[in-house]
Amino acid sequence: MSTLKLDVNSYRDLLKQYIEYQDEQALYRAEQFSKQAIQHNISPDEIVDVYIQSLLDLYPDLSPSVKHSLNFLLETMISFGMAYQEFQALREKQLELQSEISVAANMQQTLLSTTKPNIPNMDLGAISAPAKQMNGDYYHFVEDEQGSLGIAIADVIGKGVPAALCMSMIKYSMESFPHSRMEPGVILEGMNRVVERNVDPSMFVTMFYGLYDGRNHEFHYSSAGHEPGFYYCAAEDAFYDIEAEGLVLGVDRKVTYHQYVQQVAPGDMVILLTDGVTECRVNDRFIEREEICEVLSQYKHLSAQEMTEQVYRYFERLQDFHLRDDFTMIILRRDV
């Protein structure tokens, strides 16, 4: 209390000096007083109270209406001070939460990482960029014992921490499968049971699994409600939708998934993606799939990895560098 009394006396002298002379030195000392108040966690209403006490000491004969107005100001600042304290507490909690999410995002990036394999006569590219810190998309490569390449791409219907946790579970479930050849339909049926048992009913997971057999150049695939990708036919220089039907994971434990097959000729490409690509918005409209094909065609002369990166940058610029959804794209091209 003695420190506060000393502050009141000092503030009164500063106020008197400024009222009488309006000099800059008084203003500078008032700034120092404000800094001292912050250091001692003095609230705004306490500063106003110091001002009122100083003013009444200097001018004890103020009219009742002025005194009432000063009391009104003090009550207003008390309410402001309480709200400001609540704001500061929430801000500290928010900063703490952001720090924890940042750590979790780095851990998720490590947990979900997958190695892009080098397959003879195949060019492979992949990119995945989260719209926020946590990624609700997932992709994974695995080589089986026969030398075939398995490609998984998935998307949680949802965002944030719950989606990220779900994706971590998907990744470790995928790694639990044996490395002997497993057909895409079998993979999705197994993942469906995992999701149905372990994921909240309000969350759903779409997933596409493809298996490229380099011996006969066939691409076998199944889909669990996932966004259709594209197939590029080099002989026709044309893009086609990869049509595959299947229920999203986690809805029906007993569902089965139909398996499709596509012959891959030299120069042909398989383009897999999530809805962060196809649902890219420009102003108030979603882009058409034909527009995506035009962008893919624009960069098809590049390597598969360069192609994915250039397509991503194109859509990033198109959205003013603010992704509205997680963006994932995988391109597989047969060289010979």
Image (tube, rainbow, N blue to C red):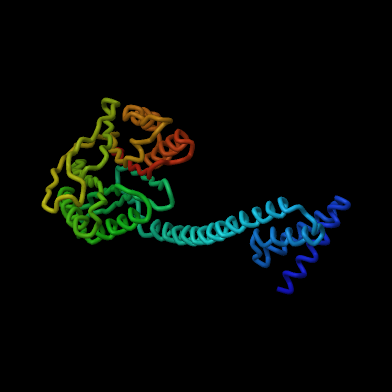
Q: Going 23% across and 47% down the picture, which residue do you hit?
A: 209
Q: Quadrant of residue 126?
A: top left
Number of marks present in the image shown: 0
Quadrant of image for the C terminus:
top left
Q: Is residue 221 left or right of residue 157?
A: left
- Whether 298 is drawn above or below 108: the answer is above
Residue that lies at the very extreme toward the front in this rendered image: 64
Give x and y (percent) for residue 168.
32, 58
**Foreground pick, 230 / 96:** 96
The quadrant in which residue 261 appears is top left
Q: Quick check: 22 left or right of 208?
A: right
- Give the residue at the far bottom of this rendering: 2
Q: Quadrant of the N terminus?
A: bottom right
Query: Could you say where residue 191 lies in the image, as x and y percent from the top left?
Result: 20, 54
Residue under the image location 25 percent in, 51 percent down: 202
Residue 98, percent across and down? Answer: 48, 57
Q: Position of residue 280 (x, y in %)?
A: 38, 35
Above/below status of 286 relative to 157: above
Q: Could you tell me which residue is drawn at 62 percent across and 57 percent down?
A: 75
Q: Taking 1 as reference, is 65 above or below it? A: above
Residue 331 horizontal side relative to residue 64, left or right? left
* Residue furthest right in the image: 21
- 289 on left or right of 245: right
